Image: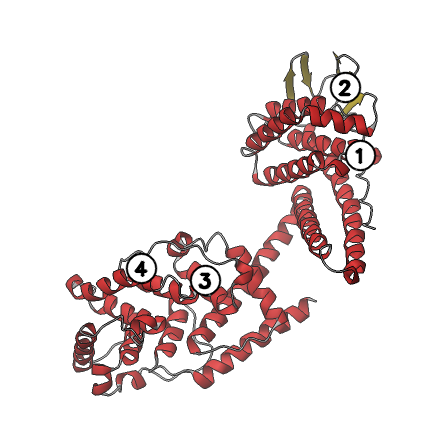
Amino acid sequence: MINAVKKSFSCQLSNLALYLQENYHSGSPEGGLAQYVFYQTNSHIPFDTVNNVSVASIERNRLLTDAPALAAVGYVLACGGQFNKDFLDTWAEGLVRLSGRSAFPVHRNSFFYRPIELFGIALGISHYYKDQPQELIWLQDILTQGETRLIHNDFWTFLLSAYAAHMLSIDWKAMGPPLVHEMNVNLLALTKWLCTVAPNFASKFGLIQLEPSIDKALLEYCIEFLILPDDSARAALLHFAIKKTSIQIIQYSSDEIKELHSSPQKAIEWLNFTCDKIHTITQHLQSQLSKESHAELPKVRTMNMLLQALSTLRSDIDIISIEISEQVRLHSSLYIGNNHGTVVTGDILSMTQNQESITNNTTINTPHSTIGFINSGSGTVSHFSQHIGEHIDEINKIISSLREMAKDFPAAQRDEVLIHLDDLQEDISTPEKQKPEKITFRLTKLLVIAGTIAGIVAGVADFSNNVLELSQKLNIPIEFNPPHLMQQIPPSKPQP
């Protein structure tokens, strides 16, 4: 699998490099943007290119009348290229003539509606006239007026044009990007490049926040499809984005593996995270497949079988997690104050709470034993569901409070708590899922997580108290046994 992935990325990069070699022309705006893509990332075009002679030899008439030629020179200037004075004077005269034309003709046949040309001209002007701000005004006015004219264009065009405006200190209003799964591969590549070279600009448009999803979508596309670029500029963006993303993923995986080898707790966190993600994806697939025709039912059953396997895997992970938690407790204390007394890990303390028909007996053992929560009660599942319905407002209020408290937890514990609270909320809200043994497991796991950060994070005691109060409101048995007796969540029954 790893070799297949490597071959896929290598093949894509080789094809893109070959395309660039065959289609690159430094005298075109597309070739200019390709050069600028690599220049801005301190990398090199992946083949031998001609020097700037072809750009410097652009005919005078083209410089005076041709916006693509003006843009090509702009890219070279932005990449540190040098030209003689006569050539630059002619280029500047061409800009003056361009400023006298309509930027927004009815037929839309102007440099403003061609983002690669617009960007090259903006770059050239910003570099050539960096000490003469008055010379920028005409293009700044065009970019200010033009914002609303591109708002309904494709996002690739809008984004590159917005970046051109940004280069001249004109900030367009942020327009939310499309969903990642709706982005084509060229847009994925452009957003990756902008996240790298202009993170502040990319953040304004919500791209930095999407970068992990963009990376994933880009690599998945590379594995599934052969990329056929439209021009040198897009080929360069794709080459950079694929190479950058694959290197980042490999580096991240390498660092992560080193951490997993050196820290059992990190290994457990990684397993929990991975399992939860797989579980979420599988549930989503199951939900989608269940909406299909009866011909798809075998797939639904397959998804259910996978969910059962994942449930068992998750329980095994929890057993290991509890074992580690016990070791953590040897070096920390958890203080739980409640209405009828105080529970302190490390000392033996029994506490009884009397209610009308239920007796709760909470016992905390010495660190050489294990912690146990035993809540004995009676009643049928229907009575249990009825009890939830009668107290649902109080239950939801406590769960909301737990979510707020979890925000102050370390990232790993916070994410895990929120996952269990989501599962708990779903179990409580769905009548067919209101199974005491499942909810018991959720509550127990929340207490375990709290125990792992006791003495490290303020408010853990309040969090634990709220979990215990939630247990009382739900009126369900809680049993937290030694690891080898750990109760597993029963697997879901396959859909008929």
* Residue wearing tag 4: 166
Q: Identity of the amino acid at label 2? A: Thr
Residue found 66% across the figure and 29% down from its top? 451
- Give the camera-side residue of 38 and 119: 119
- Residue at image mark 1: 483
| Residue 317 quadrant | top right
Q: Crowdedness of circle 2 by 10 Å Cα count: few (<14), some, many (20+)? A: some
Q: Nearer the viewer, mark 1 or mark 4?
A: 4
Circles 4 and 3: CB atoms closer than 8 Å: no
- Cα separation, mark 1 vs mark 3, equals 47 Å
- Tag 3 near tag 2, CB within 8 Å: no
Q: Amino acid at mark 3?
A: Thr
Sequence-first disc among 1 and 4: 4
Residues 320 and 440: in front is 440
The one nearer the camera, 2 or 281, is 281
> Which quadrant of the rendered structure holds the N terminus?
bottom right
Is residue 374 shown to the viewer in this render? Answer: yes
Give the spatial CA distance, label 4 vs label 2. 64 Å
Q: Position of residue 54 (x, y in %)?
A: 31, 86
- Judged from the image, the secondary structure of the residue bearing numbered disc 4 is helix
**Dot 3 alpha-carbon crowd within 10 angstroms: few under 14, some 14 to 19, many 20 or more:** many
Q: Which mark is residue 363?
A: 2
For disc 3, the marked residue is: 191
Coloring applied to the structure: secondary structure
Q: Spatial distance from mark 4 to mark 3, Cα to Cα?
A: 15 Å
Image position of 374 (left or right of 45): right
Disc 3 versus disc 2: nearer the observer: 3
Q: CA distance from mark 3 to mark 2?
A: 55 Å
Locate residue 284, reporting x and y percent. 68, 52
Which badge, 1 or 3, is on the more N-terminal residue?
A: 3
Work out whether mark 3 precedes mark 2 in sequence or the reverse, and give the earlier one.
Answer: 3
